[in-house]
Amino acid sequence: MNFEVKKQILEKIKEYDRIMIFRHIRNDGDCVGATKGLKRILQLSFPEKEIYLIDKDTAQYLEFMGPEDPEVPEELYKDALGIVVDTASEARISNKNYKLCKELIKIDHHIPLETYGDLQWVEEDRAAACEMIVDFYNTFKGELKIDSEAATHLYTGLVTDSGRFKYDGVSGDTLRNAAILLDVGVDTELLFARLYLEAFEYLKFKAYIYEKMQVTENGVAYIYVDKEMQEKFNLTLEQASACVGTLDSIRGCICWMVFIDNNDAEGTIRVRLRSRFVHINPIAEKYHGGGHACACGATVYSEEEMRSLLRDADALVKEYKDTHEDWL
Ligand code: AMP
């Protein structure tokens, strides 16, 4: 699929001596895995090229994936090819020096919010951006090389963005691409331990969430992790945000979300929205965000706006339940 654009991307890569790889702010397993995996594949395949992945955004739970490259002088961006992975809009590109690159390629699996760059390869049906990088490797495997380091990065993104191969976006291709990586070599026991073991204290926080969670009339489960709760459990913003999965298995609650007080001067509240069956991206887009049909992010600027978002989500869920069967 999309052979022509992939071929054009490979030609561009061959044309440039220097390649800069970019990803989105508030990084996650997929954007880190896809950028690190791509970098490693390109390094192995074109050892004479300079490949940089420069990003200061870090996530504690992904530290095991290793550090990024140190910043380089702006001059070096100017004759480079930029490749932005897993990022729907320019505003979400983490390293703003992407603007300096001579040419820019977008490789993404989000619902497109806007077009940017000189060349775009977007497949919103892919379970993860990592899947697209594996597909890219596999399409040109006569010319590209992979090893177990690259495979582990890419597998990390596949596992995390697909909810361990559970979400709706998982297709036969997802599993075929995962199989390619396992054949190369991934220590899955170590990887799953790194990703999913939780600290004793964090489980106490989760227990508190189960105690405090709320549900709207038509089945939107939610929790507001306000400043007080963050202090009570001594949580970083990253830890506070990570609890969205806690609400994912309540029968009848086909949409769930967490609100996280960002503790900034503007009083912004981050929203992480998730759903099954019903598509909730229109809600995220209405509230300054976006993402995927069933997993998206947004920002609200007051508790009043938070309540307004909840009302909209509740109405959407009601409408869905009234007009569909086979949800639970
Ligand atoms: P999160 O809850 O932050 O993990 O976001 C879920 C998905 O939505 C991820 O794929 C994000 O890249 C995407 N996303 C989160 N926030 C935004 C936003 N403000 N605009 C567009 N996409 C977003």
Image (cartoon, helix red, strand yellow):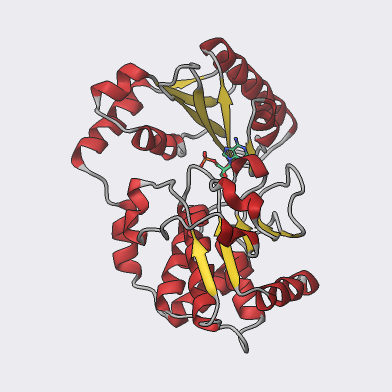
Relative to the observer, which residue lies in front, 204 or 82?
Answer: 82
Residue 174 percent location from the top left of the image: 58, 66
Residue 171 percent location from the top left of the image: 63, 63
Residue 293, visible in the rendered structure: no
Residue 193, visible in the rendered structure: yes
Q: Residue furthest top?
A: 304
Q: Residue furthest left?
A: 200
Residue 111 percent location from the top left of the image: 70, 46
Q: Quadrant of ligand 1?
A: top right
Which picture quadrant has residue 4?
bottom right
Residue at x 58% of width, y 30% of height: 298
Relative to the observer, which residue lies in front, 155 or 209?
Answer: 155
User: Which quadrant holds the C terminus?
Assistant: top right
Residue at x 72% of width, y 72% of height: 6
Which picture quadrant has residue 280?
top right
Relative to the observer, which residue lies in front, 283 or 207?
Answer: 283
Q: Is 49 on the left or on the right of 151, as rendered?
A: right
Residue 217 percent location from the top left of the image: 57, 17
Which picture quadrant has residue 279?
top right
| Whether residue 143 is situated above or below residue 78 in the rendered picture | below
Residue at x 66% of width, y 56% of height: 108
| Whether residue 70 is situated above or below residue 270 in the rendered picture | below
User: Which quadrant holds the N terminus?
Assistant: bottom right
Q: Residue furthest bottom?
A: 142
Instruction: Please state the total of marks drawn on the protein image.
Output: 0
